[in-house]
Image: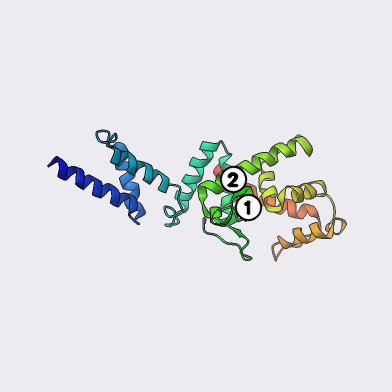
Amino acid sequence: MKLLRTLLSFLLLTASVYSGENNFKELWLEWLKEDSINQELPIYKWAIKELEKEKFSDAFLLKDKKDLVKQQIIAICKEINAPIPVVLAIARIESNFNTKSVDRGGSCVGIYQMKNGFGGCVGDDRYCLEKTTKALWKIHATYKQRWLKQIDSTWNDFYYYGIHQKGFAGFVEIYKNRHKKLNEISAVRRNSILASKPSSANWNDVNDWWCYFENRFYKIYNQYK
């Protein structure tokens, strides 16, 4: 009987790991963690380890529940000490929490719309929630320190998003020229700003870009504070 019970446990645990049903996996993971009697068995340890890995895999997120994606982002942010409202706001604005998102040109993908190589994420890594969230924060934390040392001693969280939109150099140029007319700045930067203009908007000043994206960011950001 003991052998039969062990064999049955093995089959059920294996099925839980390799099942395509995410609800089944979630229930099994919860049950395994509550089963204090058998948790020390090697097969239990293996199953818990595999199911924990699934929590951060794209396969686990295929059901595309936004609340689940948010929960995973929050968990990762807590692990790496990243600002939760900032990361959630960027994810919401860039892809509406879709880990499989691809922009119209096909060059920026994933939940944070990363170009190939951004933060060290290459190819399909840009669809991995855990890798991209950690890469996003690592590079933006570096940019913040660079900003405070080289540009200005003050900082607000919109700058994370502004840099994400235009790159560090591009955002710095906008910051320094935000009180100028668009026709007073370089053609390259002017074209970059106008490329992100809503079709219904009428922008004449650099500050028009600034106000639009700052308001857009904080409208979402404040929901997660």
**Is residue 17 visible in this depiction of the protein?**
yes
Looking at the picture, does residue 154 appear above or below residue 53? above
Q: Residue at x 81, y 56 (%)?
A: 205
* Residue 202 position within the rendered picture, expressed as x and y whole percent measured from the top left: 76, 62
On the question of residue 223 being in view, the answer is no
Q: Image point 56% across, 54% down: which residue?
A: 126
Which amino acid type is shown beneath numbered disc 1? Gly
Q: In the image, is residue 203 above or below residue 149? A: below
Picture coordinates of residue 171 (x, y %)? 75, 49
Q: Secondary structure at mark 2?
A: helix
Q: Amino acid at mark 2?
A: Ala
Per the rendering, the mark at residue 135 is 2
| Residue placed under numbered mark 1 in the picture | 117
| Residue at the far right in the pictured view | 184
Of 30 and 154, nearer the camera is: 30
Rendered residue at 17%/43% (across/down): 5
As helix, strand or loop, the secondary structure at mark 1 comes to: loop
